[in-house]
Amino acid sequence: MMRPINYLCQPRVTPPLSLAHDAYWLRALSRPAASRMGTLRVYDFSGDVLSLGRYHLAPPRPARSAVQLFRRCSGGRVAPFGDGFVGVALALPHRSALVSEEPLALAPDQVMNRCVRGILEACKLLNIAAFYPGRDVVTVDRRIIGLVSFETDSSGALLFEAIIANQRDFSTLPALLDAADPGGTVVAEMLAPEVTTCVAHALRTTLTMEEFGDALRRGYEKQFQVLCVPRALSTLEQQTIEATATGEWSDEQWLRWRAVRPDLDRYALQRVQLGVIEARFSLEQDRFIKDILFTGDFIANSAAIERLERELRLCPAERDAIDTVVSRIFAQPENYILGVGPTRTIADTICKGLSI
């Protein structure tokens, strides 16, 4: 028997409403009756949008800019979004749900390798030879056509996210950054036109978001033996999602979740696999970490980062003490931080800010 999962296709949804949908479907997975019912959601935004990862600082709003800022639920790199791009959100009961009943059957660095296969299959159905070389990108002829990431919430539920270049490509990023972040708050790698591509270029024709969404639906069905069932929302569900969109997922509340803090007067940056990891912190009596904020392009479960920032408060500002806290947290199998290399990179980064 094929396992059913919800399927939603949402053209021109607003960013807060999109986030509220993800939160709703993740919370639904905690209900016993929905314990095996995931959700595949395909959507797009209108206009020009700069998509921040969960852990990027939100730049100050420019006086005049047509570019909208959006913060994803998952970590990873900053990316262009909006017109010409398609978003994919796959909510599942746990990170291994596509392949196993055991929540921790997949190691964290295997999760995207499995979840991305539905996207690769969709591209194959469209006669696009897409490839997942690892880390956070999907490529065609070694040119980036998609970025992927994921988050697991405190209950273990998974949200896999992807941005697919449909009619525009990722080389639009520099122009969006210039408009939305002229002060350079967000550190980002610029992608030149020759290393990016899009579905329209690969096919020599254009697809609507709905047409690409249909290919994604068929791709996940074929790859994982699931049945994507179109899901119509009840009036109560719509009201619930709309209420959270104007509350906890509003632009100001969620977007400014990570912003510049003048009290954190120490700073260090480390180049890592996906881009950068940054540590902003302050000291107590020059001997202990008083408070700390990690920002950048890494992919990690939010509960681990929250615990890391909490347990480093009042930790001695010494490499061994810092590394002990980091190692203890990421030794737990449910926790992960990807894209930074070995976990000692975290202590190394903080120590750069200590000048030791």
Image (cartoon, rainbow, N blue to C red):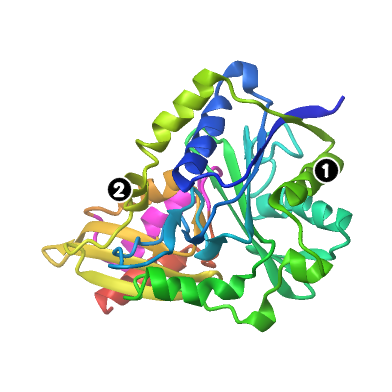
Q: Which residue is drawn at 48% across and 40% down?
A: 17
Labels 2, 1: front one? 1
Dot 2 crowding, Cα within 10 Å, few <14, some 14–19, many 20+: some
Describe the element under mark 1 as helix, strand or loop: helix
Q: What stretch is highlighted in magenta?
A: 315-336
In the image, taking residue 228 as reference, residue 148 lies left or right, namely left
What type is the residue that disc 1 sits on?
Arg
On the image, the x and y values in percent for residue 342 come to: 52, 66
Using the image, determine if residue 257 lies above or below residue 273.
Answer: above
Find out whether residue 343 is within the magenta segment: no
Amino acid on which the number 2 mark rests in the picture: Arg
Q: Please identify the quadrant where the C terminus is shown.
A: bottom left
Q: Earlier in the sequence, mark 2 or mark 1?
A: 1
The answer to whether residue 187 shows anywhere in this view is no
Query: How far across and how far down the image is residue 309, in percent?
Result: 32, 52
Q: Residue 348: image x %, image y %?
A: 39, 71
Which of the 4 image quadrants contains residue 39? top right
